[in-house]
Image (cartoon, rainbow, N blue to C red):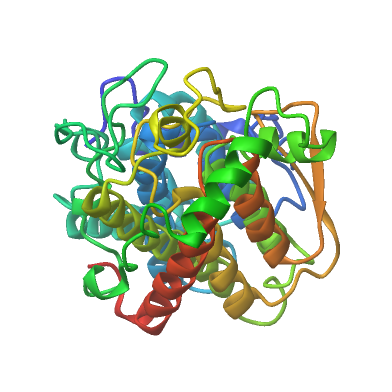
Amino acid sequence: MHTSKTISRRALLATAAGAGAATVLTPSPAGAAGPGVDTLLEWYDVTAAAVGVITGPQQVTNSRTWAIAWIAAGRALAAARPGPEAELALAGAVHETLLVTNPAAAATVDAAFAATLARLDVRRPERAVAAGAEAARAVLAERAGDGLDLASVNRPFTPPPPATGIWPRRPPAFAAAVPARPGDGRPFLVRGVDALLPGPPPALGSDVHLRDLAESRAVGAADSAVRTPQQTAVARFWAQTSLNGFTGALRTTVAPGGSHAAGRRALARRAELIAVFHAATIDAQITTYKAKYRYLAWRPVTAIRTGSVAPDPAWTPLLNTPAHPEYPSGHTTYAGAAQAVLDTLAGPPRAPFTLTSPAAADVTLTYRRWSELTRDNIDARVWQGVHFRHTDEVGAAVGRRAALAALERRHGGPR
């Protein structure tokens, strides 16, 4: 299952045995591997580094990688002896998953694995590593053909003929729909997403539609005179993908001292939280994309430029509009699902935490409640000029509903 560039497990074990006190840097805020390193957090950061900063067409596929890796880690932990052997089994599961799903990161992932092997005192490391790899292969086999790989979620989509209110390829680039097919994917936890879909968007000319049209026109324009500098900063910050944005938030709950990191079963509980978080947010994303391509609602840029209410052909949003339909919002669906998982399984943050964004390196935001991230996602997509407010509010509700349905079924494992 490995490419020719991937170091064999035997070679990794040999490297670890001969590494002694050598330091191997890993792509982790925790720094170089050594005494006191938290193995779960180490491999959380290795996963984040292997996945990397992603764009919209990759989000669902990389969420899938996170879910598979950490479902496998949880299974490996359940079968291993507590202590260093369990930690090594966890590392083996995540390592194997990343080699298969993200082979371009093999050198980084192998270096991190060698560091973990060198650090952990396990009498028979081969057994723990093999158990982790076996767990990963089992989950990968269960998820084979789930329609969430990069090629599947980005299969071509032919939009319908132009019509009022119907999504066309959006200006200025008029690019093809990307991603167009996540809604066809197989969920991780829920039986199906049809029961989770929202009703249709507000009718054109309705009070809600006219209210939202006016707001987006005023506050979402590139040259808006009413959007404040702080609103612009929040809008720019949340231009990043949701997976990027919530990786740091989830990390605060599984880091030592986090809300989910105490107690005798801390390692297993932390791994389960990571796995369930990603499985549930994937199910929410499948739901929202199925709805997007069912309703094919047009975006503010089209409604404002060509609609029947005071059309303005020169109107330009603050940020480029994503190349898929309007309703509901993917960002806020993800946020609502993430909030539901964190509220339910992690509880409130123990302390304020600060996040950064690859989309706005000059902006940092501090949060005290999970609901504040949802609030900012709802507002940001309006202030960016890429969504209507009702669309964002419905997205958050859809995400919450999908996540709670997933949580009810989480002990069934991946489907």
Residue 204 can be seen, yes or no: yes
Front one among 4 and 364: 364
Q: What residue is shown at x 37% (from left), y 55% (from top)?
A: 285
Picture coordinates of residue 8 (x, y %)?
Answer: 34, 32
If the image is split into quadrants, where does the N terminus sit? top left
How many discs mark residues in the rendered view?
A: 0
Say left or right for 316 vs 151. right
Q: What residue is shown at x 16% (from left), y 51% (from top)?
A: 144
Picture coordinates of residue 413 (x, y %)?
Answer: 31, 73
Say left or right for 52 vs 288. right
Say left or right for 30 vs 18. right
Q: What residue is shown at x 76% (from left), y 66% (from top)?
A: 369
**Quarter residue 17 falls in:** top right
Q: What residue is shown at x 51% (from left), y 44% (from top)?
A: 387
Front one among 4 and 320: 320
Relative to 237, does residue 40 appear above or below in the rendering? below
**Quarter residue 161 falls in:** top left
Front one among 285 and 72: 285
Relative to 341, does residue 137 appear above or below in the rendering? above
Picture coordinates of residue 138 (x, y %)?
Answer: 23, 59
Residue 45 can be seen, yes or no: no
Picture coordinates of residue 133 (x, y %)?
Answer: 33, 52
Relative to 288, does residue 24 appear above or below in the rendering? above
If the image is split into quadrants, where does the C terminus sit? bottom left
